[in-house]
Image (cartoon, grey):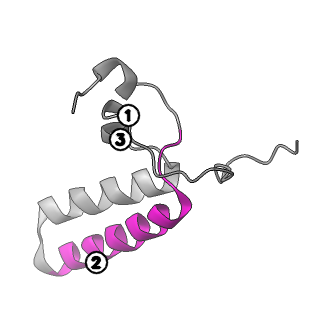
Amino acid sequence: MSFDVKRMIKFEHNVGEKEKKYRMAAGAALVLISLFTASIILLVLGVILIATGYSGWCPAYSGMNKSTVEEGEKPSGDNAES
């Protein structure tokens, strides 16, 4: 598996709707747990998961040329009608 750094900086939606929900839920859980345990690592991981879930873009997925967006699925920010 090769990792392309140039592709990593391109902003292309590569996180599907189902995975977005999982990332947001896991991120919120980690942030909540970090508040009770005072763990900075859990807080940072939770914020990263929330940010990638909200934006629909994961730089690591871009670098590995991976996408979980299913065919026919529009990014949630697209309101343009075809």
Position of 63 compared to 81: left or right? left
Residue drawn at point x = 48 percent, y = 69 percent = 21
- Dot 3, crowdedness within 10 Å: few (<14), some or many (≥20)? some
Q: Nearer the viewer, residue 60 or 66?
A: 66
Q: Is residue 32 magenta?
A: yes
In the rendered view of the protein, which quadrant contains the C terminus? Answer: top right
**What's under tag 1, amino acid-wise?**
Asn
Q: Are marks 1 and 3 in contact (CB under 8 Å)?
A: no
Q: Nearer the viewer, mark 3 or mark 2?
A: 3
Q: Residue at x 39, y 41 (%)?
A: 66
Q: CA distance from mark 2 to mark 1?
A: 32 Å
Residue 13, percent from left and from top:
53, 41
Q: Please, what is the three-letter code of the amino acid marked with disc 2? A: Leu
Residue at mark 1: 65
**Circle 1 Cα neighbour tier, 10 Å, few/some/many (<14 / 14–19 / ≥20):** some
Which residue in the structure is indicated by mark 3? 61
Compared across the picture, whether 81 is left or right of 55 comes to right
Identify the image quadrant of the N terminus.
Answer: top left
Magenta stretch? Answer: 13-36
Tell which residue pokes out farthest to the right in this image.
Answer: 82
Residue at disc 1, secondary structure: loop
Q: Is residue 78 above or below residue 9?
A: below
Element marked by disc 2: helix
Mark 2 or mark 1, earlier in chain? 2
Sequence-first tag of 3 and 2: 2
Mark 1 or 3: the one toward you: 1
